[in-house]
Amino acid sequence: MKFLRNPEFRGMLLILVIIAGVGFALAVATGTLELFAGPQAFDKIVYVSEKTGTPEIWLMKPDGSGRVALTSGAVVRSAPAISPRANRIIYVGKFGKTEQVFAVGTRGGKPERLTSATGPKQQPAFTPDGTSISFIASGRVYAADKHGEHLSPIFPTPQEIHAAMTDPLRRGEMPIYIAYAWGPDSEAIVGIRQEPDGSHSAVFLPSRGAKPMFIPLGVYLNQLIAGAGAAQQRAEITRRVQVTGVSWSKTDSMFAITLTAESDSYLFVFVVEKGNPAIAGFKAFRGAVIAQPTFAPDGSALVVAVKSSRKHTEDGLLRLDLQSGTGQLLASGLFEQPLYSPSGDRILATRYDRAHTTKDLVSLDLSTGELKQLTHDGCSYFGIWTPSAKSQAGK
């Protein structure tokens, strides 16, 4: 073609190619373009640290070495979440005077803002298949594509909204959601909502847009306590059931909910069969608070952090075998947010000192019982494992 012989046109074409190439490289590096895998961070740990003066996203190796900051001035407000392809991290950060959901690549760079609406944001997450993100905004659970577009509400469902609008006692008050967890198929989801009296209940959806199934945790709790022959300990109407954690097994149709009622805590394990959740396990913890449960990768066990109000009971990380129901104290101390490694051989957690003034990440080797401190700045927390490179084999 004649215009290609023109030096001026050839120069303009070269400039456009260079600009496009640079833009493409930057998009891949920051994770905003996921046509290819881009820079990936397999077998690492992502966490939040305040060592620079503000909460920022950091990356390190499982032994605590190779620490590098991925953000600067982000003022992170939530635990980070990483995509199944290990190349993109999302989190809630400050944007002016508002909280928004951001994404950043695993090499850092300028974060991409995914939301714009005002109001508090919480619990950003990727669906297990990595095709969508989700988060809580002003008490509602939303899902969107990886760039925050095509936003769709998950909770409260249309049925819940209709019930609230037509209930004269609620006077149009909408349910407020405080937590949620995705099933391994990226369709089923369980949400935790706050009732008008301040207590919590659960709502299960077998798929997005399906009819919600209400799980009355307080009623179930009384039935199970009575069935265990401890009717005197039943949760009275005035006792508020407060959910402290919800988690879903990555390989099975099974989820767990931890809750408190006055000074005691309880663990529910539900199994989903033919789209319906049923109670498969129940355990009481007298005089203790248990928080977010974490499933072993094979679904055989759960680990929870236990904080006791009794003088002669230890705080620590407790492993529960789901077959036998027996418990084993793995480590003593004040812990939060335990997570199994992808291979299931270690537990990552945040450990506090007794005064609750410093916090650092630790790793517990389940084969040896060795507890290793990974950070030493006294202000690191919200640690998560990145995906394993072995899990990507053959994909």
Image: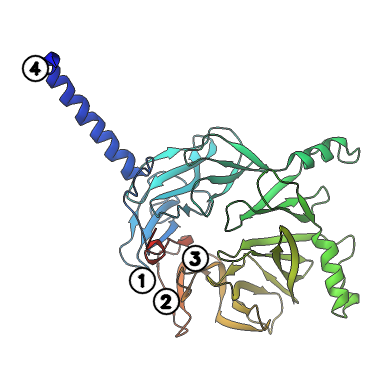
Q: Residues within 10 Å of mark 4 (few under 14, many from 20)?
A: few
Look at the numbered discs 2 and 4 and tell me whether their residues touch, using CB distance below 8 Å.
Answer: no
In terms of sequence position, does the residue under pointer 3 or pointer 4 come before the other? 4
Q: Residues within 10 Å of mark 1 (few under 14, many from 20)?
A: some
* Residue type for callout 2: Lys
Q: Which residue is mark 2?
A: 372
Look at the numbered discs 1 and 2 and tell me whether their residues touch, using CB distance below 8 Å.
Answer: yes
* Residue type for callout 1: Asp
- How far, Cα to Cα, is label 2 from label 3? 14 Å
- How far, Cα to Cα, is label 3 from label 4? 66 Å
- How far, Cα to Cα, is label 2 from label 4? 66 Å
In terms of sequence position, does the residue under pointer 1 or pointer 3 come before the other? 1
Above-or-below relation of 225 to 109: below
Residue extending farthest to the front is 1
Q: Which residue is mark 4?
A: 5
- Which mark, by number, is residue 359? 3
Please identify, in this view, whether the residue under mark 1 or under mark 3 is nearer the observer: 1
